[in-house]
Image (spheres, helix red, strand yellow):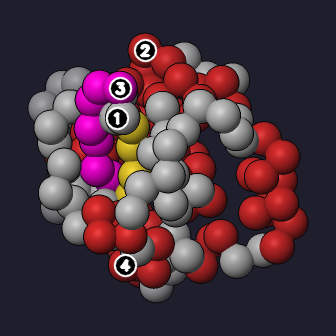
Amino acid sequence: MRLTLYTDYALRTLLYLGAKPDTRVAIHDIAQTYDISENHLVKVVHKLGRGGFIVTKRGRNGGLLLARAPQDIRIGDIVRYTEEDMGIVACNQEKGSCRLAGVCRLQGLMGEALNAFMSVLDRRTLADVMTHPHLLQTFQMMLPTAASEPMTREHEYNGHDHNTAFA
């Protein structure tokens, strides 16, 4: 299964925010770090905010934060939320039905494979994929330092500003 660029951007955004847990981050900083479209990233961030994965706040002291601790964000949940079509085979959607319907076992096999794939992702959290020390060192070298303002612990994962806007 190939994940969409949308999901890739969502995962990268969450990794970035996880690397700066006490700092409000601007969308521009994330887009610049990964060299990706800021306009596309705005859409991804908006959806992540609606889904409760991140806290978004607009304005001078605005920015993005994880809405929950990294160990509470399952990779499988992110993928399910951001992927519009999880089907592996289309079974002749163009014509409305497949001539092999009722006798083909391919769709069931692909469904089983998808369930196995998602089961692996459900066992892993954002914290799990952030444990490699070189990953965090790499992020620290890539992250802009002056653009963001620290947040207090009381706001860090509680979601009070969730869905207010996006930076």
Dot 4: element? helix
* Residue at image mark 1: 62
Question: 113 left or right of 98?
Answer: right
* Residue at image mark 4: 72
Query: Does label 2 or label 4 sit earlier along the sequence?
Result: 2
Residue 35 at what x, y percent from top left?
Answer: 69, 23
- Point out the stretch of residues depicted in magenta: 54-60
The part of the image, by quadrant, that contains residue 90 is top left
Residue in front for this viewpoint, 9 or 55 = 55
* Residue at image mark 3: 60
Residue pictured at 51% horizontal, 70% vertical: 126
Residue 53 at what x, y percent from top left?
Answer: 31, 57
Please state which of the two labelled residues, at mark 1 or mark 2, is closer to the viewer.
Answer: 1
The quadrant in which the C terminus is found is top left
Dot 1: element? loop
Question: 70 left or right of 36?
Answer: left
Q: Are marks 1 and 3 in contact (CB under 8 Å)?
A: yes
